[in-house]
Image (tube, rainbow, N blue to C red):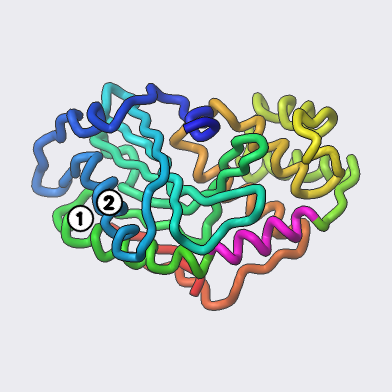
Amino acid sequence: MKGLTLHCGAALVDLKKVIDVPTPEHTDTWWPIPHIRLIDRVAEALHSMNMKILESAHALTREGARYFGLLRVGNCKQAGKDFGYVIGLRNTHDRSFKASLAVGSHVFVCDNLSFSGEITIGRMHTRYIEDDLPKLTARAIGLLSQKWTVMEDRYNLYRQTEVNDMLAHDLMIRSLEIEACTTRQLPDVMSHWKEPKHPEFKDRTAWSLFNSFTEAFKGGSIVQAPRRTIGLHALFDNAVGFKLPENRIAEGTEDTTVVINQ
């Protein structure tokens, strides 16, 4: 799965190793689920919507306690000519974060990956997680084909928006302020902006700068990737004047969070 694996900072494994990870016993307040259970629920939801997993990459860290997966999805509304869609998954057995799903994009020319915030779900590992996961994943997957037009509109506007060095440097500094980028990554962002590795990004546009960031993120923390790139989208959306559709839903309980644009 060329490219997608470059973003995994943990040990890449095959699906059998994910299945073989033991699940800790639950307590009165904490109910961990097998990593494969989350994968299966998403696969079932995709199948019900006539979508399928074309490729996948899986990673484990902390001796299997944390899982991160990437699923490239097909048989759905076509993506742009230079990017496709992925779903990012994560689950934990050490209480460090919720079982969650986020929609992402895979840029073909440079194998860069980023996550947007149009559809994200998260469910804490509490007693009724097994009951809630099928409903949550089905709801999110059911809206995927509608929401992907949002990403295509966004990236088209990025391509059309010219960016000079002054604005580029301003966005780089602001990315630090919102923690979408680290001080260690910033020199790489600047390098990719000044000397793009791919001719497709030689134009001085927001699209080229955005991919300078995602190129620099390769090999970074797999746990931080969704949060960082969701923040990066928000920063660039504001800079180019891109507005998400109205009727944004951000709901949840103590256990569950759902963010979906209707």
Residue at position x 66%, y 52% in the image? 81
Residue at position x 52%, y 31% in the image? 2
The residue wearing badge 1 is 129
The residue wearing badge 2 is 124
Q: Residue 90 appears at what percent x and percent y?
A: 35, 42
Number of labelled discs? 2
Q: Main secondary structure of the magenta part?
A: helix
Q: For label 2, count other residues whose C-alpha is less than 10 Å away and answer few (under 14), some (14-19) or many (20+).
A: many
**Residue 215 sits above or below residue 239 on the image:** above
At label 2, the amino acid type is: Met
Answer yes or no: is residue 148 visible: yes
Q: Tell me the SS state at disc 1.
A: helix
Between residues 196 and 115, which one lies in front from this camera angle? 196
Between residues 53 and 237, which one lies in front from this camera angle? 53
At label 1, the amino acid type is: Ile
Residue at position x 71%, y 64% in the image? 242
Q: Residue 239 appears at what percent x and percent y?
A: 77, 56
Q: Residue 187 appears at what percent x and percent y?
A: 74, 25
Between tags 1 and 2, which lies in front?
1
Q: Residue 193 appears at what percent x and percent y?
A: 80, 34
Q: For label 1, count other residues whose C-alpha is less than 10 Å away and answer few (under 14), some (14-19) or many (20+).
A: some
Q: Which quarter of the figure has residue 59?
A: top left
Q: What residue span does the magenta drawing correspond to?
A: 148-159
Question: Cα distance, mark 1 to mark 2?
Answer: 7 Å
